[in-house]
Image (cartoon, rainbow, N blue to C red):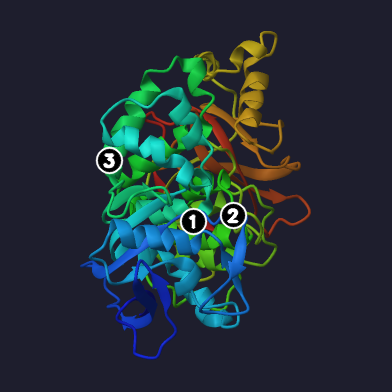
């Protein structure tokens, strides 16, 4: 892959920026397509903010007014670096839409190949980093500063972090003397942050939703084999993050699930490209989106292109929904198929135990367990129907009501679990169309273990 980086080694006569007494311009270099070894460039991770200024390399297009200060900070903190990748300058301009889309779809590849990723927060974070470098717990005032950092919840920063081989954090500041280091290893920072949050009373921690999300992010960076995590989990994480341009939502998700070059998905819409990439990986867990289903023959299980919001906002375990398309059908592996039935006594007991630990449970003292289960799902972002389907082992809440039908089956993704159950599909045939199956995603609320649960392959058409 050919990649542009900012470097002082650009060709003589090329346009240059004067930074810290040295001229820096765009340098094109070839990067091997394999991800076995890192390449000799640094990637920068930062939030753009709201300010804009003309791009020095791609006029008349605008870039963040933070880009130049962030680049100067990175050069100052890493004085031996001679190749730096920073999005505003190194992503092809909108006047080259094909090259730009290919680069944006390959962000996971780019960040995974860099020798290091440097996170640059705004100058307001300087006292926080200085405190962390002293190995002193952060005060609530420091936590308030961090909570206000847009970097914490930007869509791009998730994939930029989890794909990093090495990660450190700094901030831009004009008040620093030359050669002053305010660079901290991310795990040292993570330890300071985690210790500081642990010192807070539980109710105080609710003031810091962004920092709680940061803890999850840094945990993923450190211990998760991220490419083994599901598309559904990526959809959940990204649904709580923000972006300036709508398509960046999907480009960032693509970078989060794959470090491959994006070749097979060129020319598609960002949403279509994301689903195609998941299909190529053999992970079909994106079907557990709240979007309406496709109406094409052989594709009725597939979500229509849209926002791809997750069915609920609850962390899921497992590597995804493994499957493959064959002979016009989707074959899903390791599923559990159950029919409708009367819930056993253990179902209500399971729901009751789960709800007792749910923070909002005390607000529903007069509700039956089935009603309280639905209210809990609504709190978790479920936008579907309260018209559940009862089974011997639990309740299935579909995204929309299931019409009167014959041959109803619940297909449970037993390899992907939530604390309350698992994602599932309902498969049914309308009386008006006995030859066609329809599918709806939903939440199976109940037990997901037991000898009656036999894993099998199912065919969706």
Q: Nearer the viewer, residue 64 or 279?
A: 64
Secondary structure beneath disc 3? Answer: helix
Earlier along the polypeptide chain: callout 2 or callout 3?
A: 3
User: In the image as oriented, which residue stretches furthest toward the top?
Assistant: 365
Residue 323 visible (yes or no): no
Q: Mark 3 and mark 1 in contact (Cβ < 8 Å)?
A: no
Q: Is 34 above or below relative to 367?
A: below
- What residue is shown at x 72% (from left), y 44% (from top)? 405
User: In the image as oriented, which residue stretches furthest toward the right?
Assistant: 432
Tell me residue 426's x, y (percent): 60, 44
- What residue is shown at x 45% (from left), y 32% (from top)? 212
Count of all numbered marks drawn on residues in the image: 3
Badge 2 crowding class, 10 Å Cα cut-off, few under 14, some 14 to 19, many 20 or more, is some
Q: Is 320 above or below relative to 390?
A: below
Secondary structure beneath disc 2? Answer: loop
Badge 1 crowding class, 10 Å Cα cut-off, few under 14, some 14 to 19, many 20 or more, is many
Q: Mark 3 and mark 2 in contact (Cβ < 8 Å)?
A: no
Q: Which residue is mark 3?
A: 187
| Quarter occupied by residue 84 | bottom left
Tell me residue 305's x, y (percent): 65, 62
Q: Nearer the viewer, residue 138 or 343?
A: 138
Earlier along the polypeptide chain: callout 1 or callout 3?
A: 1
Q: Which residue is mark 1?
A: 156
Tell me residue 261's x, y (percent): 39, 73
Q: Nearer the viewer, residue 252 or 286?
A: 252
Secondary structure beneath disc 1? Answer: helix
Earlier along the polypeptide chain: callout 2 or callout 1?
A: 1
Q: Quadrant of the C terminus?
A: bottom right
Q: Which residue is mark 2?
A: 243
- What residue is shown at x 34% (from left), y 70% (from top)? 21
Q: Mark 1 and mark 2 in contact (Cβ < 8 Å)?
A: yes
């Amino acid at each position: 892959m050919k990649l542009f980086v900012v470097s002082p080694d650009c060709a003589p006569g090329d346009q240059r920026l004067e930074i810290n007494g040295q001229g820096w311009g765009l340098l094109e270099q070839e990067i091997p397509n394999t991800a076995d070894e890192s390449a000799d460039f640094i990637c920068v991770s930062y939030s753009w903010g709201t300010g804009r200024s003309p791009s020095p390399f791609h006029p008349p297009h605008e870039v963040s007014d933070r880009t130049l200060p962030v680049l100067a900070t990175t050069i100052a903190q890493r004085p031996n670096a001679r190749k730096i990748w920073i999005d505003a300058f190194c992503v092809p301009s909108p006047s080259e839409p094909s090259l730009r889309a290919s680069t944006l779809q390959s962000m996971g590849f780019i960040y995974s190949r860099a020798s290091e990723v440097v996170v640059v927060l705004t100058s307001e974070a300087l006292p926080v980093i200085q405190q962390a470098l002293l190995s002193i717990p952060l005060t609530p005032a420091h936590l308030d500063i961090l909570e206000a950092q847009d970097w914490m919840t930007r869509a791009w920063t998730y994939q930029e972090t989890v794909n990093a081989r090495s990660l450190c954090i700094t901030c831009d500041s004009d008040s620093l003397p030359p050669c002053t280091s305010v660079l901290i290893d991310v795990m040292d920072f993570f330890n300071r942050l985690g210790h500081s949050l642990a010192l807070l009373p539980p109710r105080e921690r609710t003031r810091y939703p962004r920092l709680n999300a940061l803890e999850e992010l840094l945990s993923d960076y450190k211990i998760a084999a991220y490419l083994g995590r599901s598309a559904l989990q990526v959809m959940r994480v990204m649904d709580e993050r923000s972006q300036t341009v709508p398509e960046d939502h999907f480009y960032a998700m693509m970078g989060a699930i794959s470090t491959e070059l994006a070749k097979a998905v060129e020319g598609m819409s960002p949403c279509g490209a994301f689903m195609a990439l998941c299909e190529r990986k053999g992970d079909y867990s994106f079907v557990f989106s709240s979007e309406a289903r496709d109406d094409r023959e052989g594709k009725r299980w597939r979500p229509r292109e849209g926002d791809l919001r997750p069915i609920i906002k609850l962390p899921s375990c497992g590597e995804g929904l493994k499957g493959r398309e064959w002979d016009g059908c989707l074959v899903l592996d390791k599923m559990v198929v159950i029919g409708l039935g009367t819930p056993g006594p253990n179902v209500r007991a399971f729901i009751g135990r789960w709800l007792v630990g749910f923070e909002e449970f005390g607000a529903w003292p007069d509700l039956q367990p089935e009603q309280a289960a639905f209210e809990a799902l609504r709190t978790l972002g479920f936008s579907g129907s309260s018209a559940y389907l009862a089974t011997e082992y639990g309740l299935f809440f579909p995204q929309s009501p299931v019409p009167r039908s014959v041959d109803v089956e619940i297909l449970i993704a037993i390899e992907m679990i939530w604390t309350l159950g698992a994602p599932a599909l309902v498969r049914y045939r309308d009386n008006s169309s006995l030859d066609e199956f329809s599918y709806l995603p939903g939440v199976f609320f109940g037990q997901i273990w037991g000898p009656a649960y036999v894993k099998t392959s199912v065919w969706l058409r």
